[in-house]
Image (cartoon, rainbow, N blue to C red):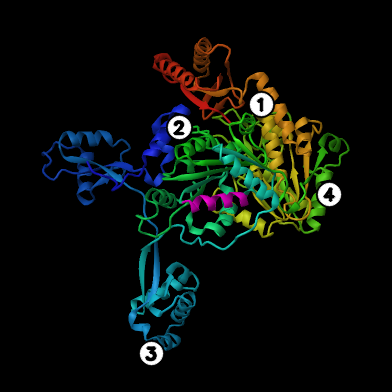
Amino acid sequence: HSVLDNTPVVTPDQFIFWEWIASYYMCSPGEVMNAALPPAMKLAGETRISLNPGVKAPDGSLGDKELELMEALRSNQPMTLSEASRSISVSRIFPVIKSMIDKGLILLKEELDDPWRPRTVRYVSLRKKYFIEEELKEVFEYCEKKAPRQLELLMAFFRQSDGEGQMKNREVDAERLTGSVKGGSAALRALVEKGILKTAEREESYFSHLKALDSKTGLSTGQQKALNGIMDAFTSRDVVLLHGVTSSGKTELYIKLIHDTIKQGRQVLYLLPEIALTAQIINRLQKNFGSRAGIYHSRFNPMERVEVWNNLLSGGISSGRSNIKYDLVLGPRSAVFLPFRDLGLVIVDEEHEPSFKQHDPAPRYHARDAAIYLASMFNAKVLLGSATPSLEAYSRVRSGKFGYSRLDKRHGGVEMPQVLVADLRKESRTKSMKSHFSSLLFENMKSSLEQGEQVILFQNRRGFSPRLECEICHWLPGCHQCDVSLVYHKKINRLKCHYCGSSMPPPGECPSCGSTDLRMKGFGTEKIEEELPLFFPDAVVARMDLDTTRSKNSYRKIIEDFEKRRIDILVGTQMISKGLDFDNVGVVGILNADNMLNFPDFRSHERAFQLMAQVSGRAGRSKKRGKVVIQTYRPEHPVIKQVVENDYEAMYKKQVSEREQFNYPPFSRVVLLSLLHIDEVVLNDAASVIAERLRAEFPGRVMGPEYPVISRIRKQYIKNILLKLKPGGSLAQEKQKLEKLAFNFRKEAKWKGVRLVFNVDPA
């Protein structure tokens, strides 16, 4: 019917890449495209109705509601269906519309709305007449006597445009100008009406404010050796793992490699596991690359994301708003979907992070693995960086598939932090605990704060209290849609489900036995934040978790305040473990290590080691050696000992031995098949049937069906079946068998309502 875009908004390479993701991760190409395209590029369609100008209504043949709608359309057309429904006060508008279409009285029009809008900036400049000094002097004299606010605005205009060259070239951002003077908007309006100032709007890049600064720094001997190791490995391998301890200066190596790639005229993709991380990394890379670095993530508004997309698509030339060309793109996992033209290098920072894996909805891809495939399409190199590499990546180094380079000393000769273990069994027995803080942690926090240092406390559970419990009958308030207990959030005074988002006020009495003796059990970040001022009244406390970082710039503000030492104690979930660089942290406290160790998953010990080692790495990153206190009821646990000794190799050997024994990755490729249904009986029958068929097709490699830890979410019961596929060339064929089996299962009427979800390489 019409051409929506003058040039294609998707490249042929993107289609190839998206089709690979759909095939490998067992989902549809449409699901991949929906995830890939930024929201503002998805055209929104809505049906509109208008009167048919060539037809008159037959006398007496219209009902009351049809007549009402005719009148409404005469005064306001076209109308959307929702507007039409409101105008005649009916909830079911379709019968009325259908009747009027049959009579030929109205026309339907499907309108497509493109939500993308370029960013426009309003600039203020001086009218030509006032370039002459005498004319301008008269204006100043008049304003001084009659309009002091206008005089103030004029003075601000000249201050802000100072150094812009000749008078005719002087212009100032209108928003910045009016914001600098009280009542500035009215004063500007008056000066424009008098013909003294004029305003003009201009399309401009969302990232034009970023300026490159000169920040050349030399590499240490250890860094140079690691860089040489990377370059040597790249001669024979396309993927290299940089294994560098925390605070060893991996980012400086990334910057050097980015410079070299850009000099060759090629693009760089820098993947980060967490949006919160981009705040610090952007500041560091801005000093080197300025506005040549495009930033792409979901916290940016839709227009900013489309600008990055269009810029990469056109090579920075056809956008018209600026001459900025993005040679470097920073972003979380979704950045792999961007329209690169000549990708030369992909950096996956903190490659071990679980947040690189997409869980819901489809495509359930892993950004690290997807980025490796994407790079292969452009003959680009991939650098994986981590202080605690994933077992999969490290095993590929051991097998010779990946190259390897090591950075085993902290930058500037700083010592690794001293890791201490607080035995909570002993502390509880001797009653030396202060609320949730052991005496060991408390004394170290106190000492650190007295010396003007900062403290980070890690508790991987948000909210105030994980559960509310009746002391008489042990009743727990549960979610009506999910099989989980509700978490109490004190700030909003509600019990909240962290899976579906439903909430309720805390009850005054137990609905089971009527007792009013209801107690909060356990603790989350909110409770820690509230209790700290009781012990450290002079300390400024802040919290960094999902609840405090929902808005676009909130996480940036917290990080900036901590960097500038406006916060003394930062309490947070795993957000605070991911590569953040603070130079004044004396003590890091891990409040409950056992939560991580006891999680029922084959990766739990690997993840616990990574998380504790990464959090520990936030301590003592400048001159003085930092301290880490791990609170646990199991100080003898092997993983705790490995963290204390910073012994990655010991952890790797033990975990790989267990994985090989039970045929888990990297010795197999795992596909998790989840079945979901609102009826538990139907679900159990369906799961038994499909498991039986899978065992016939894949003998000895099927586990389950079993209920997961959370067996019901959003009113749907869940059962999981784990399938271990042989790695290698037969993987694609085995997936085809699996898809065929699922296709035949879905066709059977008996299982029509049962939803099947494939998760390839679950994290």
Amino acid type, residue under disc 1 in the picture? Pro
- Residue depicted at 81% across the width and 34% down the height: 635
Other-residue count near label 3 (Cα within 10 Å), few / some / many at <14 / 14–19 / ≥20? few
Amino acid type, residue under disc 4 in the picture? Glu
Q: Which mark is residue 443?
A: 4
Q: Give the camera-side residue of 641 and 378.
A: 378
Other-residue count near label 4 (Cα within 10 Å), few / some / many at <14 / 14–19 / ≥20? few
Quarter of the image with the N terminus is: top left
Q: Mark 2 points at which residue?
A: 21
Amino acid type, residue under disc 3 in the picture? Glu
Secondary structure beneath label 1: loop
Name the residue at the right extreme: 430
255 in magenta: yes
Measured Cα–Cα span from mark 4 to mark 3: 72 Å
Q: Give the camera-side residue of 735 and 759.
A: 735
Other-residue count near label 2 (Cα within 10 Å), few / some / many at <14 / 14–19 / ≥20? many
- For marks 4 and 1 on the same chain, the one whose residue lies earlier in the sequence: 4
Query: Which quarter of the picture shows residue 272?
Result: top right
Measured Cα–Cα span from mark 1 to mark 3: 82 Å
- Residue 619 percent location from the top left of the image: 73, 49
- For marks 4 and 2 on the same chain, the one whose residue lies earlier in the sequence: 2
Measured Cα–Cα span from mark 4 to mark 1: 34 Å
- Residue 326 percent location from the top left of the image: 45, 53
Measured Cα–Cα span from mark 4 to mark 2: 52 Å
Q: Which mark is residue 134?
A: 3
